[in-house]
Amino acid sequence: MCAHVRAQWAAPGQVKIALACWVVNMDTARYFGDNPPAEKEMFLPPEGTAQWDEELTSRVIGHLAARMNALATARPTTDEHLTITVPLVLT
């Protein structure tokens, strides 16, 4: 599994987390592609050819949302990410 995570300020005391996940199948790559997979196979477009796994992304962002006390449910972005807003906790 591979993931792309972005974090940015959303508002005072809040951070927006964006996540996209995909799977790179190493066994399939041995038979149909390069072993290990070519670098472009391990990145989402436009840099690569990997396909976004919406179900996996949804499950992972759901776990993050629960553990980070998200302020609302995950929302999609225009670039195949799901986004949550969480409180900023400084310790």
Image (cartoon, helix red, strand yellow):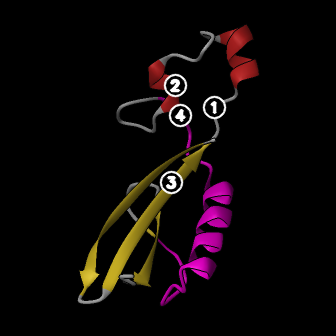
Residue tagged 2: 41
**Residue indicated by mark 4:** 50
Q: Whole-Å distance between the Cαs marked 2 and 1?
A: 7 Å
The location of residue 16, given as percent across then percent down, is 36, 74
User: Which amino acid type is shown beneath numbered disc 4?
Assistant: Ala
On the image, the x and y values in percent for residue 9 come to 26, 75
Q: Amino acid at mark 2?
A: Glu
**Residue 24 shows which numbered tag?**
1
Report how far apart the C-alphas of labels 2 and 4 lie in the structure. 5 Å
Closer to the eye: label 4 or 1:
1
Labels 3 and 4: the sequence-earlier one:
3
The label number, if any, that marks residue 20 in the structure image: 3
Q: Earlier in the sequence, mark 2 or mark 1?
A: 1
Report helix, strand or loop for mark 1. loop
Quarter of the view holding residue 36: top right
Q: Which residues are magenta?
A: 49-75
- Label 3 vs label 4: CA separation? 11 Å
